[in-house]
Image (cartoon, grey):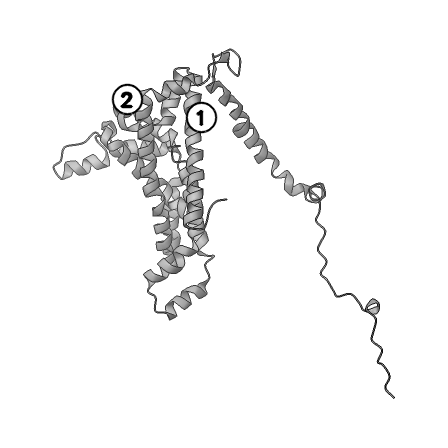
Amino acid sequence: MLTAQATPSHSTQDPPDTPLRPRRRSWSQALRRDWQLYSLAVLPLLFFLIFRYLPMLGNVIAFRRYEPGGDLFGEYWVGLRYFRMFLADPTFWQVFTNTAVIGALTLLFCFPLPIVLALLLNEVRTRWLKGFVQTVSYLPHFLSIVVIAGMIMQTVSIDGVINQGLHAIGREPVAFIQEPGWFRTIYVSSEVWQTVGWGTILYLAALTTIDSDLYDQAMVDGASRWRQTWHVTLPGIRPTMITLLILNIGTFLAVGFEKILLLYNPLTYVTADVVSTYLYRVGIVSGSFSYATAIGLFESLIGLALVLGANTLSRRVAGTSLW
């Protein structure tokens, strides 16, 4: 006689093991637990608050008439008067053109050369030689702008090293520092000498994150060193390249104020005067604070537009962006 086999009831079955998610701590709990770590961020936050964000309130004087010794936020409202003034000023557009040209030349040379130097150093197998080249290329970054300007002035002066070399080959000395046509060459070449070595640090760090198996596979496929660099190394450091490119484009118009102020003179204003030095003469020397603030706000808006545009273009073309 057949008997029905009893089947276990679902109520007596053990529930399947499910991983328990760790309960997320609230912000206050995390602060109480790691307050020592969070306290390290207090001073940087205060710095940015006091010296970066609070001064932004002063941009209101670009739309108000400001007189030294009067109301901190201006005496009365003038609207877009100062914007119309500098947009109709031929001197401003000459200064803006100089800034764009010097910024473009600096970006053209100072952005790709650290990548090239990092790739060359990555191929050096002699440890002491690689360390020596890195140290020598880093040193100019740690020199003061005043020291660098003094070295440049001594090098390109009438009795400097360059003119002594020209005299040795029978050429007449050239007053480089007084010639408007030579200023951009002097500035960009000094920027390359000062910043290229320091700029390789991030790229050398990015090169260490590339999987060595990719190079082995490329060698098995018969790729040369140039092909390995093109198809493995450069794609591996592409996110770093794009991030630094976007940041450099954001400071496209923020050409070095201190170095230009130390190197230029009235004879070279035609090619050397940039927005930052023009703001210094108009705002600080002449006392036209509202006019200078309007120009600075206009420059900041252009920088913001360049950053947003570069980030959007990078995301659509390369698939990588800063945010």
- Residue type pointed to by label 2: Pro
Would residue 142 be seen by someone viewing this image from the given angle? no
Rendered location of residue 136, percent (x, y): 36, 47
Q: Which of 192 and 97 is in front in this view?
A: 97
Tell me the number on the disc at residue 266: 2
Q: Which of marks 2 and 1 is nearer the N terminus?
A: 2
- Residue type pointed to by label 1: Leu
Label 1 crowding class (10 Å Cα cut-off): few <14, some 14-19, many 20+?
A: some
Residue labelled with disc 1 = 297
Identify the residue shown where x is 37% and y is 47%. 114
For discs 2 and 1, the disc positioned in front in the rendered view: 1
Rendered location of residue 315, percent (x, y): 45, 47
SS at mark 1 in the image: helix
Tell me the number on the disc at residue 261: none
Q: Nearer the viewer, residue 189 or 243?
A: 243
Residue 44's image quarter?
Answer: top right
- Does 199 sit above or below residue 267? below
Identify the residue shown where x is 40% and y is 45%. 199
Q: In this view, does 104 lie to the left or right of 251?
A: left
Quadrant in which the N terminus appears = bottom right
Rendered location of residue 98, percent (x, y): 31, 30
Label 2 crowding class (10 Å Cα cut-off): few <14, some 14-19, many 20+?
A: few
Would residue 130 be seen by someone viewing this image from the given angle? yes
Rendered location of residue 308, percent (x, y): 45, 38
Q: Distance between the residues labelled 2 and 1?
A: 26 Å
SS at mark 2 in the image: helix
Identify the residue shown where x is 34% and y is 69%. 222
